[in-house]
Image: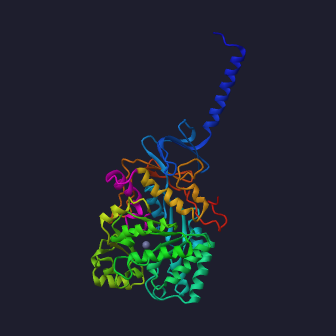
Amino acid sequence: MIASFGARMRNVLVFCFLFFSSLLTAQQFDLVLEGGRVMDPETGLDAIRNVGVRDGRITSISSEPLAGRRVVHAAGLVVAPGFIDLHQHGQSLDSERVKAFDGVTTALEMEIGVPDVAAFLKAKEGRSIIHYGTTASHCAARSLGFGTPLPEGTILPKSGPATEKPATPEQIKQIKHRLGDEIGAGALGIGMGIQYTPGATRLEVIDMFRLAAERKLPVYTHMRSFGSIEPGSSIEATEEVIGAAAITGAPLHIVHINSTCLRDTLECISLVAGARARGLDVTTEAYPYIAGMTAINSAVFNPGWREKMGIDYSNLVLPNTGEHLTRERFEELHRSSSQQMVLIFANTQEMIDATIPHPLIMIASDGDLGHPRNAGTYSRVLAQYVREKKTLTLMEALRKMTLMPSQMLERSTPAAHRKGRLQEGADADIVVFDPQTISDRSTFEKPMEPSIGVHYLIVAGTVLIDDSKMVPEVYPGRAITSPVKTGSALRP
Ligand SMILES: [Zn+2]
C-alpha cells in the first residue's frame, strides 16, 4: 500500500518527535535506579519500578524505562527511603560511615541534645556524609545554670551538685533562657535526660515541657527511672512525662523504652497506647539489643541502681576490653571525673523480641562508639525480625525506620515531609539493599564492624555507597533544623 503524502508527513513528524523526546529523556535524570523493588510505607507501593533522581529529589517513579546520566541496575534489590535514626550520639565520621552501611541517611542527636547547637551545626557543615540535627540539651543548660559547664566533647554530666540539687527559680529562668537560645540556633526540640539530672523536680520538668509547647516543638526524653521498685518505677517515670505532655500540650517522644522499662516494657508501651487513645501526641522507640550503655560516672549509677535494674556489678562490662566490673572497679570509675562508657546487660532477649515488632515502636539506635547498636541496629532488625523470626513484614520494618521517624520530625520542621518517603517530590535519600543478605556484623567484641547488604546509598541525590563501597571525599549530609533558624539547606 502506498501511503498518502499526509500520512508520510505525519510519520516524519512522529519520528522527529520521538527522536528529540528520546534525546530529552536521555538527559532527564542525574541518576536512575532501574528495576528494583520499590517500597514506600506511606502509599503502600511495593512493585518493580524505575526511580529517576534529579537535583537531589526523586522526580519520577515509573514502570516505563528512564534514562539518566548514571543508571544503577537494582534488579533483585529493595529500593526504600533511607533510614532515619532519631537517636544517634556518635556524630564523628567513623560513626557516620557505619551508619551509612546500615542504611541510615539521617542520624539525629535527639535524646539528650548537644551542649552548643550552633557550634555543632557549624562543625558538621560540609563535613558530614549523612544528614544531622539535634535537640537543645536540658542537661547541658542545667549544668551551665549551676556554673559547671559540661567538659568539651561530652553530653552527659557527671553525678554531682548540678545533677542532684533542685534548681532555684533563678536557675530555672537561666535554663529556660539558654534552651530558648538553642532553639533559636536551630534545635529540633528539647532533649531531656531526666535520669541524668535527678535533682530536677517534677515542676522543673513541666516548665521545660511548657517552653517546648510555646515553641511548638516536641520533648525527647530519657525518663527519670528504670525498674519495678516503687516509688521510682519505670511506670511512674512514664506517667510523669505523659502527665507533662498532657498538662502542656508539648508532643512527647520517649526514647529507648526497652532499656528504661526493661521487664515492664510492654506495660510502658501500653501506657503510651492509652495516652494516644486519649488524643495525646506521644511516641516511642526501641533498639534490638539486650544491653544498654551509658557513662559510669553519671547519675544513672547513683546508689540503688543494682536493686532497680535487678543486676549486679558483673553485669557491667567495659566496651572493647570486655572487662566485667567488680564492686571496687565500679566505685573507682563511678567517682572518676573522666567519662568512661559502660555496657549494662539488664534486659532479656524475650523482651526485646516482644518489643521490636510492636506497631508503636520506631527503630532508633542510641548509637555511640563501643556498642554494636551504633553500626548494626537497622540491618539487625531486617535480618532477625523480618528474615529469620518473621515477626515483622519488610514493609512494617521499613515503616518503623522511615515513615514513623519522619512523621515525628514533622513536629519540628515541615522539611521532614520530604523525608522517609519513596515518592515523587521526596528528597533523594535512598537505600538500595539485598533483603536476602542484609545483616549486622557488629558485636560487643567488635562494635564497629559495618553491616553488609546495602549495595547503594543515595544521600540528597549523591551516591555515597556505590556497589557496596564507600565513595571517598563526598559530603552530601545537610543540617535538619527547626524553621526559626534561617539559611538551613532543608528550608522548605
Ligand atoms: Zn538514654
Assess whether residue 365 is covered by the magenta stretch.
yes
Q: Is residue 257 above or below residue 236?
A: above
Number of dots carrying numbers? 0
Q: Nearer the viewer, residue 485 or 281?
A: 281
Would you identify the image quadrant in which residue 208 lies? Answer: bottom right
Ligand 1, by image quadrant, is bottom left
Q: Is residue 147 above or below residue 123?
A: below
Q: Residue at horizontal 69%, vertical 17%?
A: 7
Assess whether residue 424 is covered by the magenta stretch.
no
Would you identify the image quadrant in which residue 301 lies? Answer: bottom left
Can I make out residue 207 in this image?
Answer: yes
Residue 117, image x, y percentages: 58, 72
Quadrant in which the N terminus is drawn: top right
Residue 114, image x, y percentages: 53, 73
Residue 188, image x, y percentages: 57, 68
Magenta segment: 364-393
Residue lying farthest to the front in this orientation:
278
Would you identify the image quadrant in which residue 26 lies? Answer: top right
Can I make out residue 153 in this image?
Answer: no
- 204 with respect to 259 (left or right): right
Quadrant in which the C terminus is drawn: bottom right
Tell me the colour scheme of the image: rainbow
Q: Residue at horizontal 72%, vertical 15%?
A: 5
Q: Is residue 438 above or below residue 273?
A: above
- 232 with respect to 169 (left or right): left
- 91 with respect to 182 (left or right): left
Q: Nearer the viewer, residue 392 or 492?
A: 392
Q: Residue at horizontal 55%, vertical 35%?
A: 64
Residue 220, image x, y percentages: 50, 71
Q: Nearer the viewer, residue 171 or 35?
A: 171
Q: Residue at horizontal 49%, vertical 80%?
A: 151
